[in-house]
Image: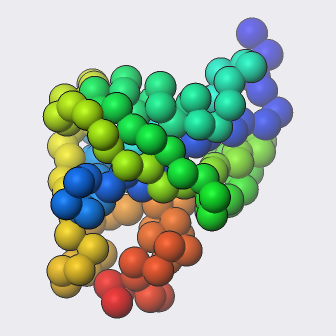
Amino acid sequence: MEKPEIIVTARSIVSSAEGELLILQRSKRVSNNPRQWEFPGGKLNAGESIEDTQIREIQEETSLIIVPDNSNAYVESSVARKGKYANSTHISITGLAQAIKGRVVLSDEHNDYMWLDPNSEYNVEYDFTRVSLNALWHYGHIDGGVRK
């Protein structure tokens, strides 16, 4: 199978009814960014919209049902330098979402999860993936890598 030239992923900063933000810790068994913290999401399937991908991926990874809001989405692109997607362009779109039903049940892609209170002090003791850290900055939750 020929590797894709462009990989598009859709992620969501999921808020609980209490306004907390969901982060997931990647499994140590995954090849990319093991044990790093990220927002749930994943690759688009052929013919799938960003919103449909967010809904599907978050349900697969966490069992939560969400309503996405991409009116102010954060977009970042990079080129993979190693691994099975080496030399492929990676476009990541991170939007907001509201959890409306369910409780978190993790897939085997993740080891742990946390609900972060955006009004509490937290530093970047969590080893966030670059895209997740930049999305937090985009939405005003951190300033230069430190919680506002």
Quadrant where the N terminus sits is top right
Tell me if residue 11 comes above or below residue 52 in the rendering. below
The picture quadrant where one finds residue 37 is bottom left
* Residue reaching furthest to the top: 1
Residue 34 visible? The answer is no
In this image, 15 relative to 138: left or right?
Answer: left
Q: Is residue 17 left or right of residue 57?
A: left
Say above or below: 41 vs 12: above
Q: Decide which of 135, 27 is in the foreground and name it.
A: 135
In this orientation, which residue lies closer to the viewer: 28 or 46? 46
Instruction: Name the residue at 50% across, 73% down.
Output: 139
User: Which residue is at a point 40% across and 78% down the rendered structure image?
Assistant: 141
Q: Is residue 125 left or right of residue 39?
A: left
Quadrant for residue 6, please give it.
top right
User: Quarter of the image containing the C terminus?
Assistant: bottom left
Which x, y percent locates residue 68?
50, 45
Residue 54 screen position, x and y as percent: 51, 36
Q: How is the image coloured?
A: rainbow
- Marks counted in the figure total 0
Rendered view: 115 above or below 119: above
Q: Position of residue 118 (x, y in %)?
A: 27, 74
Q: Residue at x 26, y 34 (%)?
A: 101
Q: x and y percent of residue 13 in the render? A: 42, 55
Does residue 83 appear to the left or right of 3 in the view shown? left
Q: Residue at x 47, y 80 (%)?
A: 140
The answer to whether any part of residue 100 appears in the image is: yes
